[in-house]
Image: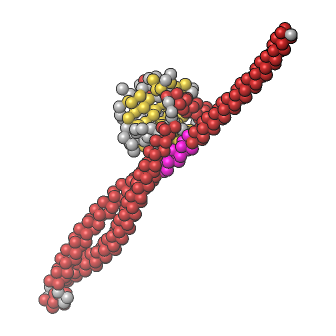
Amino acid sequence: MIKHLTKTFRASALCTGALLCLCVSQSVYASGDNQLDGVKHELSRQQDQLQDKQKRYVALQNELKQRELTIANATKKIHQAENKLKALIASIAKLNQEQQNLQQQRLGQQEMLRELINTQYRQGEDSQLANLLSGEDSHTLDRYTVYAERISKARIDALTALSAIDTELQLKKHELAQQRQQQQALISELQAENEKRTKEQTKRKRTLAGIKGQMSNDRSYINELKVNERRLIKEIAKAKLEAERAARQAPMDGLAKHRGKLPWPVKGSVLHNYGTKQQGELRWKGMVINKASGSKVNAVYPGKVIFADWLRGYGLMLAIDHGKGDMTFYGYNQTLLKKVGDNVQANEAIALVGDSGGQEQSGLYFEIRRKGTPTNPRTWLKK
């Protein structure tokens, strides 16, 4: 009986234990499923956040591009207006001088006319009749007659010249008034464009602050630099094709014979040298020269413009093909003065120094590539 009860108890205990194990297992599995769902949800949330962040970053970069292009357009208009204003000021100064000369000529003609009138008055209207009655010989009388005629002709010529001077003087005054009106219009245009540029520069600063906020760490910045470099290489590949096509039409001699002889694109201290550390394992492929915003950037050698546009990381950039696979690049500009297809000469202004591409200070990014490979630009420039 006892043995039977014992067996019955053991069987009951085993059943209870099995039921407990089954309940615990189901509870553990349920808990695990919940945790897995939570992990999946968190991953999905973080992925959405990352995508939103990337979209925001791209939007900020596009906004930066538009801001800098607007600034570039305003700067170009200001540059053109300033050049027109200089020419106009010189023209006005010339007109003023011409006006003064004409006034002096007028005074001279008036004085001459006064003398002629006095001479004719002293001779008298009836002098020829008086001479005839005086019994002078015919030779003397002829001389008096010629003298009187000459005085009369000189008087008429003086009056004609005075009238011509007066007419020219009036024309100069009218031209001067028109040019002064143009000068005032240009000054107003300059003020408006300067205000527009100042507003855009303020907005650009806010955009840059937003971009920096998106850069969470150095790795993000390094990745951005790598992407920017790939963009440059892509554009270089396009530029090479254009350069090869242009070379077939008008071959150029390249830079090979001019190492150490090229003029500097701008004069200034070097902020970053070729080959020095940029960020992480990345190194500078060109050099950055410190220069005030708005300064002229000059081509270092004759060539043809094969790229002139905004490029992320480099801002407003211009590339010139010099032939034989040699190209020079000028980045960070405030505005470009040349367009694709333009031929340029050494020391010709091609752009104005700036801080485009999101730079924190103004300067020029200058790079030389030979057959697509960067080379130290400093070894090509005059010492």
Q: Whole-percent x and y of residue 307? A: 55, 39
In the image, is 224 to the left or to the right of 116?
right
Q: What predominant SS class does the magenta segment belong to?
A: helix
Is 66 within the magenta?
A: yes
In the image, is 61 to the left or to the right of 260?
right
Depth check: give the residue in front, 184 or 347: 184
For the N terminus, the image quarter is: top right
Depth check: give the residue in front, 113 or 300: 300
Identity of the residue drawn at 49% across and 28% down: 218
Range of magenta residues: 57-73
Residue 57: name its quadrant. top right
Is 162 within the magenta?
A: no
Q: In this view, does 224 lie above or below 145?
A: above
Q: Whole-percent x and y of residue 28? A: 71, 24
Q: Whole-percent x and y of residue 277? A: 45, 23
- Count of number-bearing discs: 0
Depth check: give the residue in front, 207 or 362: 207
Q: Is residue 182 above or below residue 195?
A: below
Identity of the residue drawn at 79% across and 20% down: 16
Q: Can residue 272 be seen in this view?
A: yes
